[in-house]
Image (cartoon, rainbow, N blue to C red):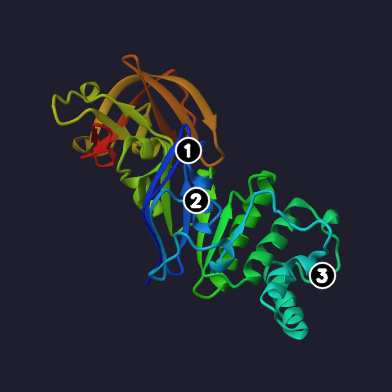
Amino acid sequence: MEKLRAENLNVKYKNFTLDLSFTLEEGEFVSVLGPSGSGKSTVLSIIAGLNEVFSGKLLLNGKDITHERVQDRNISIVFQNYALFSNMNVEKNVAYALRMKKKGRKETDEKVKALLALVGLSGYEKRKVSTLSGGECQRVALARALAKEPEVLLLDEPLSALDAALRKRLKGEIRRIHDASEHMTTLYVTHDREEAFSISDRIIIMKDGHVEAQGTPEELYRNPPTLFTAMFTGEGTTLSPECFGYQSDEIDSVFFRPENVIIKEGQFWGDLDQYIVLENAEVISLDYLGSHYLILLRYNGHDLLAESEIRPDNKYVNAYIRKSGMRFYRDDRLI
């Protein structure tokens, strides 16, 4: 069931224009991914009602909320700087939305207790916000947002200020909390590709104020609809078709992932009809990533990336590119 729809939403600034169309299904966890300045956070501000819309429509459950006040939308937003009330303890921060709804004391206490348990902060009710760690503050902010029982939860780079180990742990917690909140739809803004790919049902790629691509993580990684999407969603190599002997007016670029390049220093036992063979490619650099090496090769003046579980012993290797892993583009669009 469709939960939220953006129809040709247009917001104009002095040096930037945002033009958006997308839908969110009920219960989906969708991430908005893109480079700095692409308009990711502005998308959340528009949905939350913090930014005025120049034209277009925003529909929640089929109802036009384009010009509704912030407090009249059943939408919650969590900012990257937490935005907690420093003069209140944890309990009062979480209870704030419930008091605005004029909930009774007993119901409020029970709800706060349940929400803190949900985010893993049972027993923190009387703690001062100033004594909390960054990860704990983010959990309180999330509990406070959930107290409103929103139909749509907006998360604006909530983990960007945390260290890598804590980000990894909390991103899984955020997904768990989403799954435990019945029928809630989540829109999560991040610049971290791995973060988005690991927890999202679907991803929206932003570029220069518009939606460049959208789909499941698997779809965007395996069949990126544009070259920008291909390079933004993972490591890869883009070469001209002439490098492979292709002569076609229909193809501008060939793209492939490192895992589709096999390197061999001895005899190759695969079906050569399934590969493009580049003999005597030069090994330029090696990055050890734990489970494999990411290898930069140079062939006839062109650089390409390959993966290997084994560190090559020689300076020159043969590279075998899987034809099934090659994607062809014209005018930066997949063909």
What residue is at 23 percent from the left and 35 percent from the top? 328
| Res 231 seen here | yes
Distance Cα–Cα, label 3 vs label 2 = 37 Å
- Farthest residue to the top: give it: 301
Residue 225 on image: x %, y %: 30, 43
| Res 327 seen here | no
Helix, strand or loop at disc 3? loop
Residue 118 on image: x %, y %: 67, 71
Residue identified by numbered label 2: 52
Placement of 231 over or under 2, stated as above or below: above
> Which dot marks residue 99?
none
Return the residue nearer the eye: 256 or 166: 166
Is the residue marked by circle 1 packed among few (<14), some (14-19), or many (20+) residues within 10 Å?
A: few
Residue identified by numbered label 3: 125
Helix, strand or loop at disc 1? loop
User: Do the residues under discs 1 and 2 have CB atoms within 8 angstroms?
Assistant: no
Return the residue nearer the eye: 286 or 182: 182
What residue is at 47 percent from the left and 24 percent from the top? 313
Residue identified by numbered label 1: 13
Return the residue nearer the eye: 115 or 98: 98
Q: Which amino acid does label 1 sit on?
A: Tyr
- Which is nearer the N-term, disc 3 or disc 2? 2
Residue 22: name its quadrant. bottom left
Residue 138 on image: x %, y %: 70, 56
The mark lying in front, picked from 3 and 2, is: 2
Return the residue nearer the eye: 36 or 241: 36
